[in-house]
Structures are given as C-alpha cells and as structure tokens.
Image: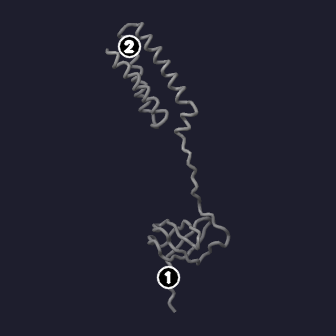
Amino acid sequence: MSWIIIISLIIIGLIFLVLEILVIPGVIVGIIGAVMVIMGVFFSYNNGSTAGNITLAGTVLLSIFTLIFIFRSKTWDRLTLKNENKSRVNEIEENAINTGDTLLSVSKIKPIGKARLGTEYYEVTSVDGYIDENKEIEVFKIEGNKIYVKIKEDKKN
C-alpha cells in the first residue's frame, strides 16, 4: 500500500481522535479515528517489519505530542467560554410589587414574558393565555418569585 495512504490514515485518524476529545461528543468519531490509526500502522507492516516498527514508533510519538499539545492550558483557554451569564430570576423585594398592581407588558406574554412596573422589569406568567405587548396587565397573584398576571379589565361605573 502507498505511503501516502498510510500516512493519511494515521493523520486523519489522529485528527478524528482530537475532534472526539475537544469538539464532538459521543464515541463514534473516536472509534473511527482509532481504527484509521490502527489500519495505517497495520498496512505499514506490509512494507516490511522495520518499516512497520518505524511507523508504529512514529505514530506513538505523534500521538504523545498531540496529547501534550491538546492538554496544554493555553489550548483549553482558547476553547473555554469566558462570558458570564448575568441573567437572573425575579428578585422581588418585599412590597415592591403587590397583587392588583398594574404593569405594562413589554413583550408578548405567551404564557411567559416581560412586564415593566416603573423602571423595573419582571418575568411574568399569564393566566389568560396570550397577551400582546404594550398592554396594561394586572398582577393576579405572586408565589415566591413567580408573578401571575391577567389582562387588566376596564372598570365601568
């Protein structure tokens, strides 16, 4: 078998193994990569035992070098998520919002959306189903940090 094919099998197999470790979850790509590396070494023995031994030793050294490169801290720093999640659950101060208060929906509430009371924004849940944005809504009930709202009814005398 041609040396180009043998070297290609080994290199592509190592690339698949690296992808398995860093990017693609599961085991299929890793198994395919390992089989390709083994096939490359196996086929190299068709060119003689000395060539096979040299290929095996080279493959082991290349694998060790690749693992050292992958597990260096700088490699992981480039792949690590650096952004911080600043979203939060409703943090309702006592008496900041009460049952019966009127809010303005700032997003569509289907059945969960955002509403504003003054300058504060809250995540609310509709008991009436779908509510369009920019509608006046009324606080129906508060359970812990969950605010239930309904469409504000016009009071006619």
Mark 1: amino acid: Glu
Mark 2: amino acid: Ser
Q: Residue furthest right?
A: 94
In this rendering, the answer to whether 129 lies above or below 69 is below
> Judging from the image, what secondary structure is the residue with disc 1 in?
loop
Residue for point 42% across, 32% down: 29
Q: How far from the left and from the top, in percent, is residue 130?
A: 44, 70
Q: Which is in the foreground here, disc 2 or disc 1?
A: 2
Q: Which mark is residue 138?
A: none
Tell me which label, 2 or 1, sits earlier in the chain.
2
Q: How far from the left and from the top, in percent, is residue 95?
A: 66, 73
The N terminus appears in which quarter of the rendering?
A: top left
Name the residue that disc number 2 marks: 44
Q: Residue furthest bottom?
A: 157
Is residue 65 or residue 42 the one in the foreground?
65
In this rendering, the answer to whether 131 lies above or below 31 is below
Q: Is residue 119 left or right of residue 4?
A: right
Residue for point 46% across, 33% down: 20
| Number of disc labels | 2
Q: How far from the left and from the top, in percent, is residue 63?
A: 49, 22
Residue for point 43% across, 25% down: 34
Instruction: Choose top left, top right, bottom left or bottom right for residue 26.
Output: top left
Crowding around mark 2 (Cα neighbors within 10 Å: few <14, some 14 to 19, many 20+) is many
Is residue 128 or residue 131 the one in the foreground?
131
Q: Which mark is residue 153?
A: 1
Q: How far from the left and from the top, in percent, is residue 134?
A: 47, 74
> Judging from the image, what secondary structure is the residue with disc 2 in?
helix
Crowding around mark 1 (Cα neighbors within 10 Å: few <14, some 14 to 19, many 20+) is few
In this rendering, the answer to whether 15 lies above or below 148 is above
